[in-house]
């Protein structure tokens, strides 16, 4: 395998058109996703799910801990 050092650097900011909350999925798109058939399941470990129409979910992994997932996208400040 050969190395190619001529590749342009990858800039994460090229994938973002806004900053902070401006990069969040729009409420309309999020609602369409959450209304889909794939989103209709029950999991007793899901503390905060799509029924709240929130932009985050909290999943109980046991031992008093949970995983938080959000649709927020934070602008990448990199050079």
Image (cartoon, helix red, strand yellow):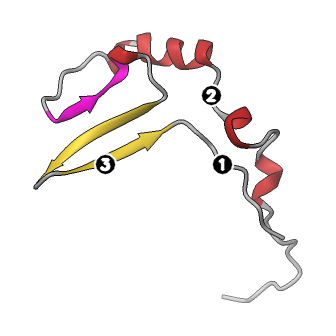
At label 1, counting other C-alpha atoms closer than 10 Å, the crowd grade (few under 14, some 14-19, many 20 or more) is some
Name which residue lies at 62% across and 28% down. Answer: 25
Dot 1 and dot 3 residues touching (CB under 8 Å) = no
Estimate the x, y position of residue 61 in percent, counting from the top left.
18, 49
Q: Is residue 53 left or right of residue 58?
A: right
**In this view of the protein, which residue sits in the foreground, 4 or 13?**
13
**Residue 58 located within the stretch drawn in magenta:** no
Q: Of discs 1 and 2, which sits in the foreground?
A: 1
**Residue 49 located within the stretch drawn in magenta:** yes
Quickly name the residue at label 2: 25
Quickly name the residue at label 3: 67
Q: Is residue 68 left or right of residue 12?
A: left
Name which residue lies at 22% across and 32% down. Answer: 46
Name which residue lies at 65% across and 21% down. Answer: 26
How many marks the image carries: the answer is 3
Dot 3 and dot 2 residues touching (CB under 8 Å) = no
Q: Quadrant of the image for the N terminus? A: bottom right
Q: Which residues are magenta?
A: 45-50
Quickly name the residue at label 1: 74
């Amino acid at each position: 395998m050969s190395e190619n050092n001529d590749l342009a650097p990858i800039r994460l900011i090229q994938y973002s058109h806004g900053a902070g909350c401006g990069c969040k999925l729009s409420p309309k798109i999020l609602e369409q996703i959450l209304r889909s058939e794939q989103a209709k399941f029950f999991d007793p470990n899901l503390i905060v799910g799509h029924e709240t129409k929130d932009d985050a979910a909290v999943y109980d992994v046991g031992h008093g801990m949970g995983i938080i997932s959000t649709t927020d996208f934070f602008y990448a400040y990199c050079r």
